[in-house]
Amino acid sequence: MAKVLFVNPVIREEDDPRHVPYGIALLAAIVVREGHRVQVYDANAWRASDAVLAQVLKADRWDVVAVGGITTAYRSIKHIVAMARALAPQALIVAGGGFVTSMPHDIMRLMPEIDVSVVGEAFVSFVEVLRRLDAANRDWAPVRGLVWRDPAGGSHLNPEQPLLRDLDLLPYPAWEFFPLDIYFKNSMALFSEEGMLARRRLDVNASYGCSLICRFCFHLGIAGDMEQVERDGERDVTFTYKRVIRYHSPRYVVSLVKYARERFGVDFIAFLDENLMTMHQSSGKKWLTEIARLWIDEGLQPQCVREGVPHDPARCSGVHWGGTSHATLVNRELLSLLKQSGCAHLLYGYESFSGRVLKTIGKGATPETNERSLRWTLEAGIRPIPNQMVGFPDEDFDSIRDNVLAWNRLGLNVKPFFATPYPGTEWYQKYKSRILRQYGGDLEAFLLDLGDATRVTAVISQKFNAVELYGLRELMVLRDLKRIAEYEAEWNRLHPEATGAKDPALARAHTTLA
């Protein structure tokens, strides 16, 4: 049986480690169930020096060094695979996750140390890699869901691996392989009082993917969105509007939370799901209702909710939770039930309060549904967390004003993220040539620059540059409508072609008349 070393890369270096990597924890459990020997080095949790990573890589004769993550972990992953190749030359280096699924051939070219990568869902493909390794068979061509390197260094993408339809076949995540004391120390999340006071939080994925087609979002092979195409004479991936909706049964979800409560003493569960409400909708509006009822019946309801008293973490038993929602899919009855089960906050991707912008991003929401869901969630006693962005392709001064006016009207305090064309999104596919021009044609420079959308990377706004986006966002946060209007007049003066004027003087006249 194989000796497998999983390495979790550093994510969000500017923040504390807050989330046990759910995908690696699941794969570790699957691999152990198959009889293999597993160790995990969590570089994100330990934030240790290269000397420690070197010790880990040389600590045993690893058969496999496996690393994966999202594109924002690219820098760390690149460093890890380079060290693995140098210090564990006998090991098969296997990569997986969104960073390679979004651009398999590009990643194999940029990281020549990688032998094999899993493209899309890894539950079946990674196990097959280990089986072949046990049999001393390194012919990867028959294994679905892989991109692999031939002796000459070329990469080859195999047909995709079908998605696992019955998610309840998955074991519980192997959380015990990770330094939970570090993660528990960073349990607090400034979304709700209960979340901020959490002492032992763990994350759960109850579903995979989302039914929506938001043009800024990526699912990367776990939602039925991935297809294979011929591109430049080789098989490659593209991402479509097709969807396969998958979710654990309510019984599995609640049993998993009970297990986390009994074994690790958790007091808060954060659902990592892209959108809980789309799964509820797909189930005939039964899924979340059943989860909430089972949560109460199985004794997970927090004591403070049950007794109607303020939350006191020193004496409150039970498990609070938070997750994601969608403005058009919630209703008062469901929100009330979720509150009774222990829901403390719901994150809403409102994105914008401009009706025009919302029509272009594929989310299906309107300013009116955004405001209604905010009001209903507050009335239910759940804290709504409004996520928004600025810098959409068709962002303009009107949409910026629409947001500020909505914040004033609703009493919101928001600092928007910057619209970012992550690989695997429709934005990336559509604006790729423009993105690369901003990095001198260097794809890797763009990947190394990607972060968590709190700063500008590639600009896809048709109207504003990076400097303008930073300045306008600051004025939005300050609610400074006066200076936004002043800069609009200046912008129109500098861009007479955008107003239809033939010279600056006419542009000024146009602005005055407007």
Image: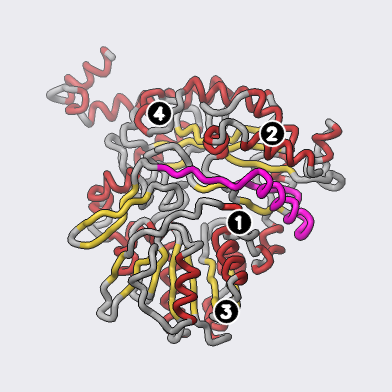
- As drawn, the label of residue 52 is 3
Left or right of 20: which side holds 213? Answer: left
| SS type, badge 4 | helix
- Residue at numbered disc 2: 338
Left or right of 386: which side holds 145? Answer: left
Counting residues from the N terminus, which is met first, the one under dot 4 or under dot 2?
A: 2
Foreground label between 3 and 2: 2
Q: Residue at x 70, y 44 (%)?
A: 195
- Residue type, mark 2 in image: Leu
Total marks shown come to 4
At label 3, counting other C-alpha atoms closer than 10 Å, the crowd grade (few under 14, some 14-19, many 20 or more) is some
- Residue type, mark 1 in image: His
Identify the image quadrant of residue 342. Answer: top right
Quadrant into which the C terminus falls: top left
Circles 3, 2 touching at the beta carbon (< 8 Å): no
Residue range corresponding to the magenta coloring: 243-271
3D distance between C-alphas at marks 4 and 3:
47 Å
Q: Residue at x 32, y 74 (%)?
A: 149
- Residue type, mark 3 in image: Val
